Amino acid sequence: MKVEHRPIGFFDSGVGGISVLREAVKLLPGEDFVYFGDSNNAPYGIKTVDEANKLTFEAVDFLISKNVKAIVIACNTATSAAIINLRKKYSSMMPVIGIEPALKPAVELKREGQIIIMATPMTLAESKFNNLMKKYENQAKIYPMPCPGLVELIEKGILEGEEIEGYLRSKMEPLKKQGVAAIVLGCTHYPFIKKVLCKLLNNEVPIIDGSLGTVKQLKRELIKYNIASERKEGGKVDIYNSLNNDEIIKLSYDLLK
Ligand code: DGL
């Protein structure tokens, strides 16, 4: 099979990366995609970096076995833990794209108040994020907000209702007094609860996620490696999950819509 006809591999610790995949399907409708979610081992955000790195390499091996031509680590946590090592191993063969909290567009809005970065504890603790923070800390007030437990709810398909609202209210309420300039969704699961966040913030605060930026980067890399599909439509999506049950596969396809 010609390289350009091979699928693009997407990976996340669970169903979160579907929020990035759905942007990719829109931007690159002629490409085929293989998605692997490791819900059996989610969440990664409270594991050690070594564990997350090892699990990410195993997931990438699975995608390689599906003959992918490019890899997108659609998980901020796995990107923090493994992207440098993955690029060392694979970038001579294929593009390896990661995702990080979209702090730059939030700073550029120049709004009053704090920029809240919602992410997993590992993403916020790792050097990738700390370097990003150093770059912008003189230009804006940045408030890193670890959200342990939130990924678990989303993995169960709980995207609205009192449990999610109560969780987010307890996080956001104490910060409202100082003013919220923007929210950055630094975990690919969180776009699925954006509606609840908007409601809690009375639709007054911009909520930013990095999916589109990541997918644009994927497009540039496909062109650079000269492996973009020449098809303009008709691409397909295959979803796999380490949980291997019908519910998680159904939830994944539902989230893609
Ligand atoms: N979607 C992952 C991320 O972007 C979730 C991490 C987790 O499994 O804790 O960080």
Image: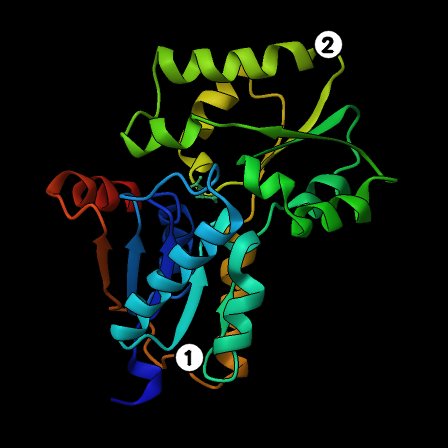
Per the rendering, the mark at residue 31 is none
Q: x%, y% of residue 188?
A: 46, 43
Report which residue position mark 2 lands on.
Answer: 177
Which of pointers 1 and 2 indicates the residue nearer the eye? 2
Task: Confirm whether residue 177 shows in the render.
Answer: yes
Name the residue furthest left: 246
Q: x%, y% of residue 51?
A: 44, 51
State the SS at label 2.
Answer: loop
Name the residue furthest bottom: 2
Amino acid type, residue under disc 2 in the picture: Lys
Q: Residue at x 45, y 37 (%)?
A: 191
Is residue 102 shown left or right of residue 23?
right
Is residue 123 shown left or right of residue 50?
right
Ligand 1 quadrant in view: top left
State the SS at label 1.
Answer: loop
Q: Badge 1, how many Cα within 10 Å: few under 14, some, many 20+?
A: many
Image quadrant containing the C terminus: top left
Q: Residue at x 44, y 63 (%)?
A: 72
